[in-house]
Amino acid sequence: MKHLVFVYGTLRENKANSGLLSTSIHIGSGRTKDQYVMYSRSIPFVSKSQKVSSIVGDVYEVTSNTLVSLDHLESYNPSSPASSWYSRSLIDVEVGSETVTAFCYFNEKEQAPIVLSGDFKHAESVREQADDVWYFAYGSNMNPARMIERNMNFTRRMSGTLKGYHLAFNKIAYNKPGVAFANIMPSDEGVVNGIMYRFPFRDLPNLDLKEGVSLGHYFRKEVQILTSNGMQGAVCYIACDDKVADGLAPEAEYVNHILCGCDLLGITLSDAVSKAAL
């Protein structure tokens, strides 16, 4: 029996384990149709836990015996998936102008720096430094694609909670009368759920520029964020007093950027945005 398998790491051509596919048929190179997240620590791990980028790799046609060998390499036991190190799922992969369905190995147990491109060839350029910055996003930057577009080279992304504030859509948008951007306002009982990013210190001026700090739109503030790893200091941006007004509403496109944080925050975020936008 023949199977299609999508590989993205050491099984790719000229990589350490490519010999296991030496007798298999190379269908072609491509990208996953859906978005996932690639972590890398010498070897890559792809997870379904976040939607950061499509994953680059190759599709092979393999025999049942070869699939067994791949399962062994990835410590995947079809008879006991829960106890396996990797899982194996069928996914859609775009190869040229065609979409094929192939097996892919996922790992939900490893954590490591993120490879933003989803391509393992870029993994060696991913470095974390002691002076890296943590940033708490509660607005459109919750969308990882927006952060990548803004040249923010983040290596970590996780959920976080800021206490003592509430989410508000009262920041006057640039050159758009009546339109709001997100803001946070002090509130004794308030809670804001958002996304934490870690990125190089050298990228911080990029974010200051996008948030209009020098133009007096937002100011940067140090806050303490509750994460799954405990409390973490981070920077966040709060609207300047003279850039806040009542009776504003966010545009649908802006809200959609925020809702891209639902991959980590789910319905909690969706409910909070709905309430704040009313």
Image (cartoon, rainbow, N blue to C red):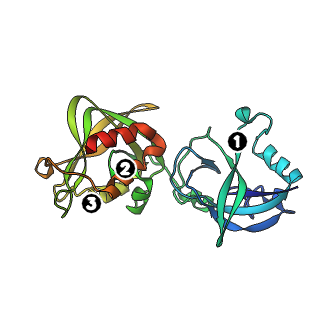
Left or right of residue 40, residue 19 in this image: right
Q: Residues within 10 Å of mark 3 (few under 14, many from 20)?
A: few
Q: Is residue 264 above or below residue 229?
A: below
Quadrant of the rendered image containing residue 191: top left
Question: Do we see residue 194 in this rendering?
Answer: no
User: Helix, strand or loop at disc 1?
Assistant: loop
The amino acid at mark 3 is: Leu
What is the residue that sits farthest to the top in this orientation? 189
User: Which residue is tagged 1?
Assistant: 86
Q: Which mark is residue 209?
A: 3
Q: Is 203 left or right of 84, judged from the image as shown? A: left
Image coords of residue 100 (percent x, y): 70, 62
Q: Residue furthest bottom?
A: 97
Q: CA distance from mark 2 to mark 3?
A: 19 Å
Left or right: 92 in relation to 183? right
User: Of the residues under marks 2 and 3, which one precedes in the sequence?
Assistant: 3
Foreground mark, 1 or 2? 2
Circles 2 and 3, Cβ within 8 Å, touching? The answer is: no
Compare residues 225 and 87 and report the one nearer the observer: 87
How many angstroms separate mark 3 from mark 1 (CA)? 41 Å
Q: Identify the mark nearer the N-term, 1 or 2.
A: 1
Which residue: 26% across, 36% down?
Answer: 166
Asked if disc 3 and disc 1 are in contact, CB closer than 8 Å, the reply is no
Quadrant in the picture for residue 30:
bottom right
Residue at (37, 49) in percent of width and height? 258
